[in-house]
Amino acid sequence: MTSDGRTETSREAREQRFAPQMSEAETLMWHVEQDPWLNPSGGSVTILDRPLDLDRFRRVIAHAVAAVPRLRERVVPARTPWSTPLWQPDREFDLSYHVRAVALPPPGTMRQLLDVVALNHQDPFDRSRPLWMFIVVDGLEGGRGALVWKEHHVVADGIGQSRLAELYLDRERDAPSTTDVDLDAVIAGANIKTEGGPGSALDIPLEGIRTLAHLVRAELTLARRVLGELALWGADPLRAADAARGVLGTVQHTRTQLLGSSERPGGSPLWRRRSRHRHLEVLRVPLDAAHAAAETLGGTVNDFFVAGAIDGAISYHRQRGASLEALNITFVVSTRDDAAIGGNAFTPVRVQIPAEPLDTKERFHSVSARLSARRGEVHGAGMLSGLAVLGRLLPASVVTGAARSQAAKIDFATSNLRGARSTRYLCGSEVLESYAYGPLAGTAFNLTAMSYHGSLHLALFVDPVAVSSPADLRADMEAAFGRLMDAGGMLL
């Protein structure tokens, strides 16, 4: 099975979801990064049974760069006020810049590795280069190795990133080694093809024409729909009332996404401060047992995952004597409709979860019902694209200020990814654990779950200024998942 549960597809057969220009949503993520609080980058940390063969890995990544143009492209600013940033080949692409190696000092603990991940994340990308980086890590205790991957969200969302990983993961330890590829020739060829193309002086008028044509088509389509709708009102008097209710519903939904619902503000009294600092904790839960417990309780693995996060967060507050009425969180709904690698197709959804005293089963049912209701309100590409269009029309300072203000009202973000069900290998090393971490984007922490080979790997990526005791929060969540297992008739 692939990272999204589909029938296995060969690397060569995968389509690529990469456009020559950023989407509206990607443009929004690109611009808000000017505020380090809102850093939209994510990544992963992979634990291997032995140190990674660096030379072999570089050959594998060279092949990936040759196969996926986005990995050798940089962002070019928009040339007109109406267009979005472009992608063009990096004429000075240097693989050694994007694939690095470090060694942990003795004793090489997991804590030391996670600190390397967090520190690396806080360094912003060089915006003149392709927006990804690998760090091969040696010296992990027990004779193990690790691979750290950081990637900007404008390149791919979580699913797109998981599918990109297929380019370097194998199903067998003794898979044939990759031969050398003339990456310099690939880069040179790409540069020749784009002379006078996107980003060049000659292309500025063409870009303006393409953008204008897109706007005109959109306006004409809207006009035709409006005229057609008006023509039907005469034959069906109730249609106008239905249309009005639809508009009001859309406005209310937009308002909810921007400002939250009409429910009480809620939110943690402990997690109100924010910073650009980051701290990473990890934990694991047996996947089959989690699935069985969730099914017994009448929900899904995602319900199990979010309910455990909520219960753990409530316990964290209770142990500190902090009053908590409700938690404001977000979860991600994928709007992807293909098996392509890369790209972005998702919308974040806000939901408020009451923090009243409940037993474990009641908490699970409360969370499950609220997630289901909010998920049902997502249609098409969701609200992110629509909000991004408005964001592009406003000054960057206004957009980042509004984004920071709204993010400060969210306690934490969650995301759930499906990974490989069987063992994977990386240049002859077995993948033992694999953790994906998502951006905080101004929240107190992000909890991302990724299933891999029988385990639910959870990465708790924290703003340590907001959450002063990340290790305690991890322990509280571990205990909460244990209670859920017990409630569902399973043992952790």
Image (tube, helix red, strand yellow):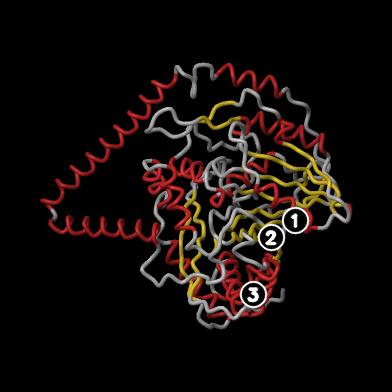
Q: Earlier in the sequence, mark 3 or mark 2?
A: 2
Residue 273 percent location from the top left of the image: 55, 63
Q: Residue at x 64, y 45 (%)?
A: 8
Between 321 and 58, the one lying in front of the other is 321
Which residue is under mark 1?
Answer: 433
- Relative image position of residue 5 (x, y in whole percent): 60, 52
Q: Compare marks 1 and 2 and give the one earlier in the sequence.
A: 1
Q: Residue 179 vs residue 186: left or right? A: right
Residue at point 46%, 48% (across, down): 400
Q: Which mark is residue 333?
A: none
Amino acid type of the residue that numbered disc 2 sits on in the rendered structure: His
- Disc 3 on helix, strand or loop? helix
Q: Circle 1 — which element?
A: strand
What is the C-alpha distance between the residues marked 1 and 3? 22 Å
Mark 3 is on which residue type?
Ala
Residue tagged 3: 480
Q: Is residue 361 above or below residue 15?
A: below
Q: Are marks 1 and 2 in contact (CB under 8 Å)?
A: yes
Q: Quick one: 361 or 355, which is closer to the camera? A: 355
For disc 2, the marked residue is: 457
Residue sitting nearer the eye, 343 or 295: 343
Q: Amino acid at mark 1?
A: Glu
Q: Quarter holding the C terminus?
A: bottom right
